[in-house]
Image (spheres, grey):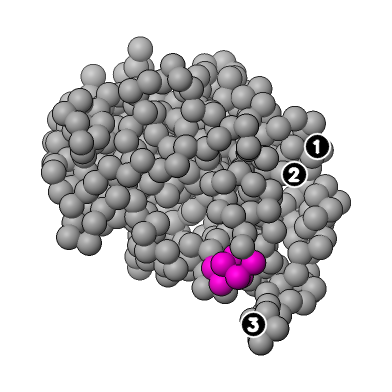
Amino acid sequence: MLDVEPIERALAAAVGQSRIPGVVAAAATRDGVIFEGARGARSAASPEPMAIDAVFRIASMTKAITTVAAMQLVEQGRLSLDVPAREILPALGEVKVLTGFDSEGPILRPPRADITLRRLLTHTAGFAYETWNAKIARYVRENGLPPMRSAKLKALAVPLANEPGERWEYGVNIEMVGRMIEAVGGSDLETHLQKHVLKPLGMEDTSYIARPAWGSRLADLHARNADGTLEVTAGAPLDEAKREFFPGGGGLFSTAGDYLRLLRALLNGGELDGVRILKSATVAMMGENHMGALNVLPLPTEMPQLSSPVDLMPGVTKKWGLSFLINSDAVPGGRAAGSLAWAGLMNTYFWLDPATGVAGVFMTQILPFADGCVLDAFDAFERAVYEVVAGGSPTQAA
């Protein structure tokens, strides 16, 4: 058995009145789960303790799950990484590049290159989110487009901010991938993911649809005020009767334990507990740099209530795989070079380190994204995990 005291200390230090109300974290090696723990409270407004099985809104951590489903279809020959995506989703053949604005409105022109699945998965297709791009924020505002969380198809009617293939920019790319999966899979994305990814992996508490059975397991969402204090923010629940689609780029609920099962499957070459979801060669390819000489760039913020400026692992050259952030340099005391990672808007984070054979999940529910307290706590958790792993050989968790 491993001595997980360093991880326990890191989580205990993370929670507090003006820091993080509550957190659930989990870590594993290829041999099995080495840690699952919860600290703090489910809500800043209640003393009820956070539980290991707490349910979180994982936002953009949805992207990795959607990508697994897309790569299953690539393996089957039903999707291709480099065929123009308009052949599957004709609407992508109508998208224009937004070059600016004049007195009559937006200035749009046809793109010079094709949108492809590879470019969508690497965020080099030209799309951008209004949260981090001023041009797209203005376009959304002036054209009355709904937010993505509304699950309205009109939210996808955004132009490109960049020419396909010329720049990395975080945007609605995986939402488009989700629509491509629906087009070739013949069912909505919730149904498809449940059948082909979530149920096979035993991710029983992962869904786009909030379940009444979760009850008080759903962690409260918090907003950090300018003075650093936290308050509970309800967030408007989605009326499922008015949902028009399931966004591949965000929207799932999950637990740390469920998400760790996905990471363990990827860590083990696409297989977990005798169930294979991807070929090992496919998993290896997903972890490679698919953006060439382009680099992942810092994200300014256009909506500070939703996100702080984002520059994860500052000073480290970062690439993008299918569809993961890749650090080209090792993180001192933490993940090795070539590790895969990403996060969710409400400050949920994960990493997957194929070289060392370690994966971890860290879940909170705080806005804005890239919260300083959470990033510090996540870093401390990651360092503690590597300290524990370096101290001995894990045993298979029950």
What is the x, y in percent for residue 179? 72, 44
Task: Provide the residue designation for mark 3.
Answer: 101
Q: Residue at x 80, y 73 (%)?
A: 110
Q: Separation of disc 2 and disc 1 at Cα?
A: 6 Å
Q: Residue at x 39, y 34 (%)?
A: 56
Amino acid type, residue under disc 2 in the picture: Met
Amino acid type, residue under disc 3 in the picture: Phe
Q: Is residue 90 visible?
A: yes
Task: Provide the residue designation for mark 2.
Answer: 180
Q: Residue furthest bottom?
A: 103
Say which quadrant the C terminus sits in: top left
Check the image and report above or below for 216 versus 147: above
Q: Left or right: 51 with respect to 60?
A: left
Packing grade of label 3 (10 A; few <14, some 14-19, many >=20) is few
Packing grade of label 1 (10 A; few <14, some 14-19, many >=20) is some
Where does the magenta region start and end?
136-143
Between 80 and 56, the one nearer to me in the picture: 56
Q: Left or right: 29 with respect to 64?
A: left
Say which quadrant the N terminus sits in: top left
- Give the SS element for disc 2: helix
- Quarter of image, res 395: top left
Check contact, mark 2 vs mark 1: CB within 8 A: yes
Ranked by sequence position, the earlier of labels 1 and 3 is 3
